[in-house]
Every structure is written in structure tokens, then in C-alpha cells.
């Protein structure tokens, strides 16, 4: 039930004169009660309800009250009420306009946001990805040069270490019985197994490296489903729930592999996408006056592979349990295609880890 006062204030509508469409999001995260597109006549808006009272799918997704925690439940509301959206938009990364914010109780906040029109990132071509990468470069450079722009206490800290510390069964990597499971044996293999071992073994070193790199403001969930390109060409990022301190290149290091992990870009095209977007990212850094070494920016991209150290153990766990779902929780039509693509992407990330080793000397 949507409160009538909110409908009148945002859409000028009365109760019963609207429709609500449930939108795909991560249902595991206890911070999000739900996301809907609400339409009344020719007007529409996105309603996102933040909460601290929802039961999490697991302890890892528990809503937190600590402002610097990566899953602080009020963060996105505070972001939209701050000056950061206008600063970011001037640098090339827009966000939906805030149409209304309502405290429904001490445990819920209703955010009414612009229903952004344009092409979503899951249908982008290389030029669109490069436009986003160049804008990321401008943002990274600006906040690296002027860290006081991102000194709000509610911004996340040490996101990568907290987010990647997921409760998974790492022992499955060494379980030969699991690797003989038909889905695993057919779609993965020794090369993927070794890539998974490498990510797990290098986790602490990669996290230390990421935390030692130059700091900037990062979106920290920068992937195609959270991106829209307006007809004007502006790149708009949705879902700012994790925004905070990160390393130069960290957002790009999330965007490139996620494009393949979620089947928007074939894994075979990742190397070309990586090369094109990194050049665009460096152009954006230079345009905003960043004078650091290109090697350092590349380290931030490559070492970001640590974010996925938990993924292969989880894939093995789900293969044995025969649980296969796409983003948002719907049943997966072709788990074999997903496993092949994700396996190839994990091998690609193992190459990033090797590159980070060389770059770090």
C-alpha cells in the first residue's frame, strides 16, 4: 500500500488511480524493502523503500546502523539529499532526480525518484561503455584531487574488504567429487579451478594493495543494470547504496567483468572491452587534471578482481544443490551457458591478478 499523501505530493494522484510495477533488484539485501515503477496517467516515478527492519537472506546482507559500514541502510537517502549528485553530474555521472523523500517510520524511508528515460546498460555498445568509463575517470580525478568533496561521515569505508568477505565454502575448490558434477565438469575445468584458487589465495594481498592506492569517491556498484544513457548522451547511475571511499579505477574494475558475469557481453569480448574502456578512463582522468602514473590507475582496475574471490565457491555450491537463478531471483533458463561464461570471465580475472603482480613489482 502506497500512502495517499506520497502519491499526491509526487504524482498528483489519488489512491486507486495508479499502478505499481515491481522492478528487478537484489532481493537478498535487507536494506531494500522493494523497488517499483509507479504510474498515474502519463506521469511515472520510481519508488524505492529503504528499511532496517527486513529479515536478510543471510548475515552478509544485514542492514547496518553504522554510517561507514558498506550496508548502512540510510546512505542512499542521505546521498540524494546532499550536494554530491550535482557535483557528480557536472563531471559526467548523473543520478535520478529526487522527487520526494518520506520517513514512514523510524525503520523505513520512501525515496521517490525520477523514472530516467534512455538506454539501459545491458543493451549498450562499446561506445556507450567508453562514455561511462571516461566520465568515471573525470569523477575519480576530481575527488582524488579534492578529497574534502567526499568527507561526509555516512559514506562507506573499506567497502571492498567487507563486501567480498562472504560466507562461502572455499573447501569446494579442492573437492574432486564436486568437480565431477555434470554441470561443473562440462562447463568449467582445470583452468577455471586454478583461477578460483588464485583469487582466494591472493585475496589478502589484493585487498591490501587496493587500500594502499590513491583514494577517491566510488559508486561501488557500477555495472550495466545500474546504468542508463539518456538521449542527450549523459550517463546516469542508479542505486547509490554503497557509495563511498574507493581506489582509483575500482568502479571500472567492477563494470568490465560484471558485463560478462551477468551475460550482457560475451566473455570472449572482455579483452577488447577492457582495452577500450581503460583508454577512455585514462582520458577522463587526464581531462580532469590527474597527473598520477597510468600504472597506478591500471593497478586499481586489475586488483579489483578480488571482489569476485567468493564467486567460484558459490557457483560450485549451487551446482551441487542445483539452484540456478538470474539477478533478481528468477529461475535461470540455461545454467550451462552461465557457467561457461562465468568460468571464462574468472580466467580473464586471473589474468588481471597476474597483471597486478607485474605492475606492483
Image (cartoon, rainbow, N blue to C red):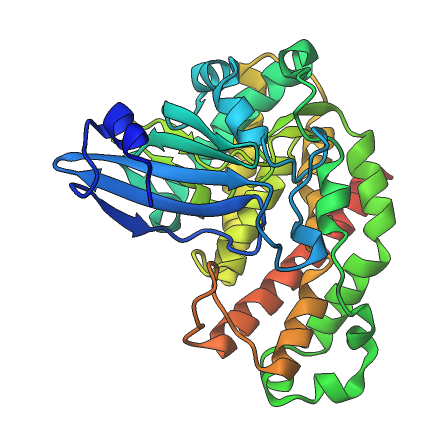
Q: Is residue 144 visible?
A: yes
Q: Residue at x 61, y 89 (%)?
A: 182
Q: Residue at x 78, y 74 (%)?
A: 173
Q: Is residue 125 visible?
A: no
Please say if 134 is above or below 142: below
Please say if 194 is above or below 181: above
- Nearer to us in this view, 293 or 235: 235
Q: Position of residue 140 (x, y in %)?
A: 60, 23
- Nearer to us in this view, 301 or 12: 12
Residue 179, picture quadrant: bottom right
Q: Residue at x 70, y 53 (%)?
A: 60
- Nearer to us in this view, 168 or 49: 49
- Outermost residue to the left: 41
Please say if 1 is above or below 262: above
Residue 160 lies left or right of residue 343; in this view the side is right
- Nearer to us in this view, 169 or 127: 169
Q: Quadrant of the C terminus?
A: top right
Q: Position of residue 96 (x, y in %)?
A: 38, 28
Residue 197 lies left or right of residue 152; in this view the side is right
Q: Position of residue 100 (x, y in %)?
A: 37, 24
Residue 272 lies left or right of residue 160; in this view the side is left
Please say if 58 is above or below 239: below
Q: Position of residue 317 (x, y in %)?
A: 68, 75
Number of numbered discs overlaid on the protein picture: 0
Q: Residue at x 46, y 61 (%)?
A: 263
Amino acid at each position: 500500500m502506497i500512502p495517499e499523501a506520497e502519491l499526491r505530493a509526487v504524482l498528483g494522484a489519488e489512491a486507486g488511480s495508479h499502478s505499481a510495477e515491481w522492478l528487478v533488484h537484489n532481493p537478498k539485501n535487507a536494506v531494500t524493502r522493494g523497488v517499483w515503477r509507479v504510474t498515474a496517467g502519463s506521469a511515472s516515478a520510481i519508488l524505492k523503500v529503504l528499511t532496517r527492519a527486513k529479515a536478510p537472506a543471510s548475515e552478509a546482507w544485514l542492514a547496518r546502523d553504522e554510517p561507514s559500514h558498506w550496508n548502512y541502510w540510510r546512505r542512499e537517502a542521505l546521498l540524494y539529499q546532499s550536494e554530491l549528485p550535482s557535483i557528480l553530474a557536472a563531471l559526467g555521472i548523473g543520478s535520478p532526480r529526487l522527487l520526494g523523500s518520506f520517513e514512514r517510520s523510524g525503520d523505513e524511508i520512501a525515496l521517490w525518484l525520477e523514472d530516467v528515460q534512455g538506454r539501459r546498460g545491458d543493451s549498450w555498445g562499446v561506445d556507450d561503455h567508453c562514455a561511462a568509463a571516461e566520465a568515471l575517470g573525470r569523477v575519480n580525478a576530481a575527488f582524488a584531487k579534492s578529497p574534502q568533496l567526499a568527507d561526509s561521515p555516512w559514506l562507506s569505508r573499506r567497502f571492498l574488504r567487507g563486501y567480498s568477505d562472504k560466507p562461502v565454502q572455499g573447501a569446494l575448490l579442492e573437492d574432486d567429487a564436486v568437480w565431477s558434477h555434470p554441470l561443473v565438469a562440462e562447463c568449467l575445468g582445470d583452468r577455471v579451478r586454478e583461477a578460483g584458487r588464485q583469487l582466494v589465495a591472493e585475496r589478502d594481498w589484493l585487498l591490501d594493495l587496493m587500500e594502499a592506492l590513491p583514494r577517491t569517491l566510488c559508486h561501488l556498484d557500477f555495472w550495466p543494470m545500474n546504468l542508463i544513457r539518456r538521449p542527450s548522451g549523459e550517463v546516469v547511475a542508479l542505486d547509490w547504496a554503497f557509495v563511498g571511499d574507493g581506489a582509483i579505477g575500482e568502479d571500472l574494475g567492477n563494470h568490465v567483468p560484471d558485463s560478462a558475469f551477468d551475460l550482457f557481453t560475451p566473455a570472449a569480448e572482455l579483452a577488447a572491452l577492457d582495452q577500450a574502456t581503460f583508454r577512455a578512463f585514462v582520458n577522463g582522468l587526464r581531462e580532469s587534471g590527474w597527473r598520477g602514473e597510468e600504472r597506478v590507475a591500471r593497478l586499481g582496475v586489475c586488483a579489483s578482481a578480488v571482489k569476485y574471490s567468493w564467486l567460484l565457491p558459490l557457483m560450485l555450491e549451487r551446482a551441487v544443490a542445483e539452484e540456478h537463478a538470474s539477478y533478481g531471483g528468477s529461475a535461470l533458463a540455461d545454467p550451462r551457458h552461465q557457467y561457461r561464461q562465468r568460468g571464462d570471465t574468472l580466467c580473464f580475472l586471473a589474468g588481471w591478478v597476474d597483471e597486478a603482480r607485474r605492475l606492483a613489482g
